[in-house]
Image (tube, helix red, strand yellow):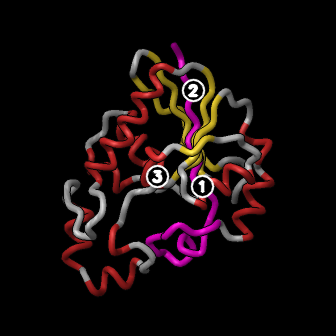
Amino acid sequence: MSVRLTLICHAATNAVRAVAFPADEPIDEQGRARASSLANAVGRVDAAWTSPALRATQTAAALQLNATADPMLRDINLGRWTGRSFAEVRENEPDAVAAWTSQNDAAPHGGESVVALLERVAGWLDKLKQQEGRIVAVTHPAVIRSAIVLGIDAKPMSFWRIDIAPLCRVRLSGNTGHWTLQSICPLAGQP
């Protein structure tokens, strides 16, 4: 069996533009317009999934995908940091931010650690072993970073060295349970 997996990061939100830990918020108008203009760039799709978060489902709709929500594609749970700016958290909890970004099993925010996220994404990728064809999933930067780390058998600390922008597309191909990273790029025509 062969799977071609395209992971698309949701469109921009106010939290993304403000460098904040997002809550369940909508995409902004600029993000919606950008996603709508890129609908044709997605290509053929045999199956589509989305995170249940509003920003992901709205992006999937703007891309004209008939996507099914899968809770395994939800964003990393950031606990009490949700909705706060990164600058505020770093100023008020510098040791917690340092622990979170240097210890993959740390969850000082009371949410999900990077290790827990990697395990969840690994479970989702394992489900795809029974699939065939072209699969598209609209999800979050943390989930996409996790899929890349898992797909190329990188060290978990590599999670922090991958930047995923809004409407970024990551392509993986897989067969017999092994993944190959094919590309990381804007969905199409982005500056």
Provide the residue designation for mark 3. Answer: 74
The furthest residue to the top: 1
Local SS, label 2: strand
Provide the residue designation for mark 2. Answer: 4
Q: Which residues are magenta?
A: 1-26
Relative depth, front residue between 58 and 37: 58
Q: Nearer the viewer, mark 3 or mark 2?
A: 3
Q: Is residue 48 left or right of residue 80?
A: right
Please say whether residue 6 is one of the residues in the magenta stretch.
Answer: yes
Amino acid type, callout 2? Arg
Local SS, label 1: helix
- Which numbered disc, 2 or 1, marks the residue that appears first in the sequence? 2
Amino acid type, callout 1? Ala
Query: Residue 44 appears at what percent x and percent y?
Result: 73, 30
Local SS, label 3: loop
Which residue is found at the position 42% from the left and 36% from the top?
124
Q: Nearer the viewer, mark 2 or mark 1?
A: 1
Q: Is residue 171 above or below residue 73?
A: above
Query: Residue 56 appears at what percent x and percent y?
Result: 60, 55
Q: Is residue 85 left or right of residue 91?
A: right
**What whole-number distance in Å separates the C-alpha atoms at marks 2 and 1?**
20 Å
Provide the residue designation for mark 1. Answer: 56
